[in-house]
Image (spheres, helix red, strand yellow):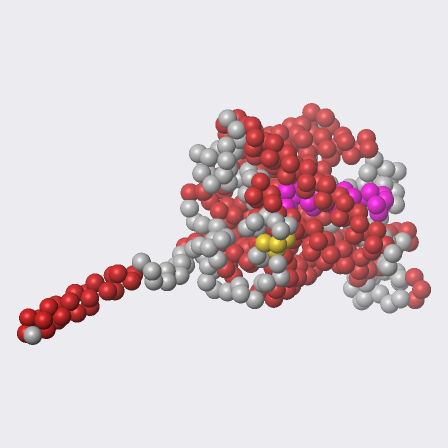
Amino acid sequence: MKKLWTILSLCLLMLSIFMPAAFADGATPEPAKIDTGDTTFVLISAALVMLMTPGLALFYGGMVRTKNVLNTIMQSFFIVSLISVQWVLWGYSLAFGPDVNHIIGSLDWIGLKGVGQEPNADYAATIPHFAFMIFQAMFAVITPALITGAFAERMKFPAFVVFTLIWATVVYDPVAHWVWGVGGWMRELGVLDFAGGTVVHILSGVSGLVIALMLGKRKGYGSEAILPHHLPMTVIGASLLWFGWFGFNAGSALSANGLAASAFTVTNTAAAAATVAWVFTEWLFHGKPTILGAASGCIAGLVAITPAAGFVGTLPSVIIGLVAGIFCFLAVSVVKTKLGYDDALDAFGVHGIGGTWGAIATGLFASKAVNPAGADGLFFGNPEQLTTQLIGVAASWAFAIVMTFIILKVMGMFMQLRASENQEVMGLDLTEHGERGYAYQDLITGSPISYDLPAGKAVAANTSISLNS
């Protein structure tokens, strides 16, 4: 009996030592740990991307006439608020929620239900889910803001608000899921879009063209000079966009790592190359280099490198930028002039064309040496990737055209889309908002030069007539 108790005691001792190890393999794994460096990087990148939309307001605002400057700025500024709310309530769930038939996210995350401080390993394992969500929110904000450049100076503000809300829900959110959402069909197909060539730029540029064609030309377009009223404002806006774009592209690495540094480098390089290309092409065509051309060129390069930023090296980024500067200049200065459509601030010429070239160029220059999670492109031995990119481009174009057309047709049954001729002449600042951006004074008396709205409507005390029609 003593020997039996001794054996049992030894067995119990051994079990107490080895039992925890025996069950360790089947234990619930520890949750992913948040990396504070990555989290800081993504949150700062989100702030940079947020700054891009007010920067866009200045970029566009300087290019319109004085009588429409506040209306143009208001559109971008208001979108920051409108889409931020939409994104939290249902937009994020539609774009990144659990997949439904590879087409759309479910509403499981509506109102950010289930989205919290812990990471979501499907998207980013080292940062809080909240950080990923708010970073993506800033992309959802700026995309419809880009469209406003196409219909500047002629769309009613109520129509703009309704269109923006619907378009973000039925165009942007589904395509964001296609390209970036887990289970999305373009992602499953292998379409590469690091930071939004298809989702942001093709959708906004092509949709902008559709709106410009359906609304028609501004009064006086093609028969009188319609000139930018404040080019310094435009250059400040372009500079803020260039600055914020580092968050846009480098931040899409979702980690403070070598890939982010590479994306940062190629972003700056492509923007610089496109600026040089646009300026010299304009100089060749028109005899003079302009600051508006330089500002437009840098945006063209930033647009083109966006889908490729996390997949291409530095020398390809130079080529992408140079070609973007030339292509977008020709689209704006030659093609638009010959075809006669009124893409007021060249949303299509820069974003539609630049985004298309960038998405295709990704299929040419992508390299797994830059990003092992990507793919090699045509020039690195994989022609199938170019075909895949072309499918993504064609699908984005088609979806943007069809859906934007349907949205406007349906809206037109219930509300006025375009400002009246009289409202255009007076300017949308006064007729839509009851205020003016500039208070001009009589040079002799020093009194404000002002006039009343038609039909006895009151004018705000700070409003005045512009000296620039």
Q: Position of residue 153 (x, y in %)?
A: 80, 50
Please say whether residue 217 is one of the residues in the magenta stretch. yes
User: What is the span of residues highlighted in magenta in the rendered image?
Assistant: 198-218
Considering every residue shown, the one lying at the far left of the view is: 2
Quarter of the image with the N terminus in it: bottom left
Q: Magenta includes 302?
A: no
The image quadrant of residue 212 is: top right
* SS majority, magenta: helix
Q: Position of residue 387 (x, y in %)?
A: 61, 32
The answer to whether any part of residue 259 appears in the image is yes
Q: Compared to 89, does 67 lie above or below?
A: above
Q: Is residue 269 above or below residue 116?
A: above
Q: Which residue corresponds to the image point at 52% horizontal and 61% vertical from the top-left?
A: 130
Q: Quadrant of residue 305 in the image? A: top right
Nearer the observer, 59 or 393: 393
Instruction: Examine the rendered structure and indicate whether residue 313 appears above or below residue 240.
Output: above
Say whether residue 416 is left or right of residue 148: right
Residue at the spot 80% in from the left edge and 50% down from the top edge: 406
In this rendering, position of residue 129 left or right of residue 100:
left
For image coordinates 49% across by 53% down, the residue present is: 122
Residue 157, how many percent across, how many down?
79, 58
Residue 365 position in % (x across, y down): 53, 31
Q: Quick one: 362 or 329, which is closer to the camera? A: 362
